[in-house]
Image (tube, rainbow, N blue to C red):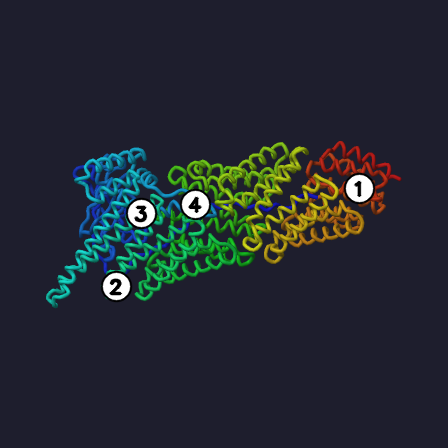
């Protein structure tokens, strides 16, 4: 008997969910001529053949409104939408200019549009790029994009709990700007700090925004939020002061309508500034991890906008500002829900879902297709966040609602009209389908994952490496994960092809996600690559399997160069857990000397995980790690010295029982079944370290654990897991039958044979020859132990020399010899004994475990003659002792000749 398949779990680090935001609204366009010049030579020289684009922020997402390539005079005619032209946070960008970057306007920011705009470029690293105006513009933009920064950092987090991990900060954003503009991060940070100190020294001459940005640069987030809130209070006072003007104008007749409209414009402007300042305050609070305060600031602003809308119910401008304020609140509730404690998270996310549903309804009434798409995308994103926080049918229902929301968004977007938004939503749809497929069973899972792969491939039609390299890499990463999940649910050549496609997708992502430029993305992709390589190794054999395992270990070690316990404890813990699993798999495939070092390292890695993934804080991750720790300890117990075996098996059993404190059949049936199977297997092995009634009691528990697993693992829904558990059950029953006597022993051995034969419905000779061979040998041992010698020979007859390794031939022929003796066919037995004398040199330790059969050999009357020699033969085969095999066979030869 050999141990059956072990069931383990790996932690896939956070998938990059990107919320699809509202796209630009179709509207009359404004002609703007942009002139791009190199400001270094005098006079400045035009820069031709570079791409110029104008973008703006909406719902924390950067939207490109217009783009064109410059002619030989450095001119690019742009058609800018009226909606974009009215905004106050436009930004111009130039790509393809080699070593040149924008100097003026500072950071490319445009407070307003003119008919002609001049963009002045300087070489990267020019001192002028770090002037006061450039630093102030840089800080202003970074705060406007704080929500986007938060999402980018969130996408780097590992894990099953996507919101845990590092938080966004201005330091990483400044580092990215420094790299893009030819400076060291330290120099830019120093200049920013000096600028902030100068503003503080000259506070009497500084504007309110400059003071707030200075506090932000110094990481005085509370002070920055207070200054922005003070600005919003002043705006609110302005709105109140304007009441008198409006009331006076309302009393006038049509001659005063123009003045009244001016006041309304002013009032809308004040409300718009109030929303701007409130968003700035919320962004500063979020940087300070004060998510509830950020939500409160935005809710207060929304209440003011609601009051203005009620005062002017027919005014579309106030209505649109109210919808903007409500959208801000919905996003803030979602973000607060993502980081809130478990008992607060779901209620906050439910509130966010309600806000997005109302927004979708209101925009539908207005017929605003881009905004409908944005609201549906926001709703879908919230459903995804809710889905990862619950289990079972509830999670599936939420993810299904997410899929529906993203599909509704796609009804509002077309690839032709809004390609980037369409691609973003396709990516989000793929992620929701992937999450649903991960949790589904059998054919339904494959159908969902196929749809996810298709959605990601659609996104890649727009997100190309040339035009959108980071989005391309992110979608390649997501595609790789979906392909990997499909591979896990497939078999044979199809599984191999899917894993290879997943590895290629991750390799594509690593072309952009480099350690130097994007270390966190690089580490996350390395982790996903490591998992895929490990899964591929599970269906490979020989040198190919070992090569895949080595590559998997290296990928996880690469990730740990970025994921440190000090900086990213959750990501570090999850990657340590994955490394522990793969080291365990590597130890299973090498000789005992190398295996022990690998198992020791695996156990230590998994114990490291438990220091971070505690039961109190992360119960599901804790349970998964306990399961994987049990597998590592179990493997170590099989290879260690006899004195440590019982202790290690006991520790493995305790680890599985710990996991079952969290894994319940009702909430997590698949995890519960997997751990029950593992528990049954280790109880079987532990029984072999003891004797008598204690061993029989352990085997009864083992069989019961396997039967429990089979309540979830059915042939129809989970054939591979069903077959593996049938093997574990067969081992428990076989060992019990070998220890028992009389009719009970026969019943147990017959049931064991049935379990092994059931596994052959999945473990076929063509698809899984190794598992099929194990089943055939197990049936043969059960028949031998039951004294059913003809049945034993029938099972062995299907095992040809071509199907077995040299050590396997020794195992087969040893049982064959005993069964030939049992049937009285001494002639065949003698010929087999002669053959075994030559094959015995190829015996290997651990090829088969005959511990239980030893009891049968000691008690069966069939082996009374030469009993000591029969016992010695099977003990020598188990330990791989060639000399002892030869000695035992020589002792048996005379009785075979009688």
Q: Which of the marked residues, 1 or 2, is nearer the chain's N terminus?
A: 2
Of the pair 768 and 346, the residue shown nearer to us: 346
Q: Which of the marked residues, 2 or 4, is nearer the chain's N terminus?
A: 4
Mark 1 sits on what residue? 857
Percent from the top left, x then y, of residue 644?
65, 34
Mark 2 sits on what residue? 310
Mark 4 sits on what residue? 164
In the rendered image, the quadrant that contains the C terminus is: top right
Percent from the top left, x then y, of residue 677?
62, 49
With respect to residue 139, does 396 lie above or below?
Answer: below
Give the structural element (helix, strand or loop) at label 4: loop
Mark 3 sits on what residue? 283
Query: Rounded to the nearest whole Å, what is the CA distance between mark 1 and mark 2?
Result: 92 Å
With respect to residue 324, does 136 lie above or below?
Answer: above
User: Which mark is in front, 3 or 1?
Assistant: 3
Horizontal arrangement in the rendering, residue 740 relative to residue 394 (left or right): right
Q: Which of the marked residues, 3 or 4, is nearer the chain's N terminus?
A: 4
Give the structural element (helix, strand or loop) at label 1: helix
Crowding around mark 3 (Cα neighbors within 10 Å: few <14, some 14 to 19, many 20+) is many
Crowding around mark 1 (Cα neighbors within 10 Å: few <14, some 14 to 19, many 20+) is many
Query: Rounded to the nearest whole Å, what is the CA distance between mark 2 and mark 4?
Result: 40 Å
Give the structural element (helix, strand or loop) at label 3: helix
Percent from the top left, x then y, of residue 873?
78, 37
User: Which mark is in front, 1 or 2?
Assistant: 2
Of the pair 700 and 642, the residue shown nearer to us: 700
Query: Rounded to the nearest whole Å, what is the CA distance between mark 4 and mark 1?
Result: 57 Å
Q: How many marks?
A: 4
Residue 893 figure quarter:
top right
In the rendered image, the quadrant that contains the N terminus is: top right
């Amino acid at each position: 008997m050999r141990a059956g398949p072990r069931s383990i779990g790996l932690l896939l680090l956070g998938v990059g969910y990107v919320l699809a935001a509202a796209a630009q609204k179709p509207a009359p366009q404004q002609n703007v001529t942009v002139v791009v010049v190199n400001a270094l030579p005098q006079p400045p020289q035009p820069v031709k053949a570079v791409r110029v684009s104008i973008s703006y922020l909406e719902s924390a997402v950067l939207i490109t409104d217009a783009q064109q390539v410059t002619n030989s005079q450095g001119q690019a005619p742009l058609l800018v939408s009226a909606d974009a032209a009215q905004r106050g946070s436009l930004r111009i960008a130039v790509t393809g200019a080699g070593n040149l970057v924008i100097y003026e306007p500072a950071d490319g920011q445009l407070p307003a549009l003119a008919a002609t705009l001049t963009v002045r470029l300087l070489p990267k690293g020019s001192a002028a790029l770090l002037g006061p105006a450039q630093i102030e513009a840089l800080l202003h933009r970074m705060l406007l994009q704080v929500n986007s920064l938060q999402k980018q950092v969130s996408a780097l987090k590992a894990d099953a709990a996507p919101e845990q991990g590092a938080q966004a900060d201005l330091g990483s954003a400044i580092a990215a700007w420094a790299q893009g503009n030819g400076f060291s991060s330290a120099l830019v940070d120093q200049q920013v700090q000096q600028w902030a100190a100068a503003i503080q020294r000259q506070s009497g001459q500084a504007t309110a925004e400059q003071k707030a940005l200075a506090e932000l640069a110094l990481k005085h987030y509370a002070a920055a939020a207070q200054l922005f809130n003070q600005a919003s209070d002043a705006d609110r006072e302005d709105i109140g002061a304007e009441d008198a003007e409006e009331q006076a104008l309302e009393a006038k007749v049509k001659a005063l309508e123009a003045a009244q409209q001016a006041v309304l414009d002013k009032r809308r402007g004040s409300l718009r500034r109030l929303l701007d300042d409130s968003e700035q305050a919320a962004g500063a609070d979020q940087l300070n991890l004060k998510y509830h305060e950020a939500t409160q600031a935005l809710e207060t602003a929304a209440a003011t906008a609601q009051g203005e809308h009620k005062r002017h119910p027919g005014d579309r401008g106030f209505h649109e500002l109210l919808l903007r304020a409500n959208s801000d609140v919905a996003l803030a509730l979602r973000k607060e829900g993502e980081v809130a404690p478990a008992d607060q998270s779901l209620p906050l996310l439910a509130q966010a879902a309600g806000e997005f549903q109302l927004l979708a309804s209101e925009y539908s009434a207005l017929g605003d297709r881009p905004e409908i798409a944005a609201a549906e995308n926001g709703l879908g994103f919230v459903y995804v966040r809710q889905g990862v926080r619950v289990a079972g049918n509830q999670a599936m229902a939420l993810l299904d609602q997410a899929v529906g929301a993203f599909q509704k968004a796609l009804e509002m977007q077309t690839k032709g009209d809004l390609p980037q938004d369409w691609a973003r939503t396709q990516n989000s749809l793929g992620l929701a389908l992937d999450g649903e497929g991960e949790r589904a069973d059998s054919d339904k899972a494959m159908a969902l994952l196929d749809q996810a792969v298709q959605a990601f491939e659609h996104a890649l039609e727009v997100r190309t490496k040339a035009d959108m390299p980071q989005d391309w890499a992110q979608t390649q990463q997501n595609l790789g994960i979906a392909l990997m999940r499909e591979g896990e649910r497939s078999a044979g050549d199809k599984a191999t092809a899917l894993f290879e496609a997943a590895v290629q997708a991750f390799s594509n992502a690593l072309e952009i996600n480099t350690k130097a430029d994007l270390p966190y993305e690089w580490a996350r992709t390395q982790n996903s690559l490591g998992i895929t390589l490990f899964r591929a190794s599970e269906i490979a054999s020989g040198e190919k399997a070992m090569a895949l395992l080595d590559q998997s270990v290296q990928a996880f070690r690469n990730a740990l160069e970025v994921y440190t316990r000090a900086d990213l404890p959750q990501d570090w813990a999850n990657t340590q857990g994955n490394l522990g699993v793969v080291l365990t798999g590597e130890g299973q495939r090498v000789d005992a000397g190398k295996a022990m070092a690998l198992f020791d390292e695996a156990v230590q890695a998994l114990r490291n995980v438990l220091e971070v993934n505690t039961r109190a804080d992360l119960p599901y991750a804790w349970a998964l790690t306990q399961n994987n720790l049990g597998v590592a300890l179990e493997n170590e117990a099989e290879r260690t010295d006899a004195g440590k075996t019982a202790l290690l098996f006991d520790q493995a059993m305790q680890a599985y029982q710990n996991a079952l404190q969290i894994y319940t059949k009702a909430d997590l049936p698949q995890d519960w079944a997997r751990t029950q199977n593992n528990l049954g297997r280790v109880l079987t092995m532990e029984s072999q370290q003891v004797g008598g009634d204690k061993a029989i009691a352990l085997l009864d528990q083992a069989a019961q654990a396997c039967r429990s697993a089979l309540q979830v693992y059915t042939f129809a829904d989970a054939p591979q897991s069903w077959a593996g558990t049938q093997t574990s059950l067969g081992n428990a029953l076989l060992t019990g039958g070998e220890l028992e006597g009389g009719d009970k022993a026969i019943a147990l051995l017959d049931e064991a044979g049935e379990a092994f034969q059931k596994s052959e419905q999945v473990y076929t000779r063509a698809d899984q020859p190794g598992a099929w061979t194990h089943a055939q040998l197990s049936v043969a041992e059960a028949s031998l132990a039951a004294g059913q010698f003809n049945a034993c020979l029938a099972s062995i007859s299907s095992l040809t020399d071509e199907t077995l390794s040299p050590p396997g031939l020794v195992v087969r022929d040893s049982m064959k010899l005993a069964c030939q003796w049992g049937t009285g066919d001494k002639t065949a037995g003698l010929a087999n004994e002669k053959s075994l004398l030559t094959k015995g040199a190829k015996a290997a330790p651990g090829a088969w475990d005959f511990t239980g059969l030893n009891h049968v050999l000691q008690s069966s009357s069939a082996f009374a003659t030469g009993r000591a020699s029969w016992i010695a033969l099977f003990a020598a085969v188990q330990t791989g002792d060639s000399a002892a095999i030869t000695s035992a066979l020589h002792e048996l030869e005379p009785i075979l000749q009688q």
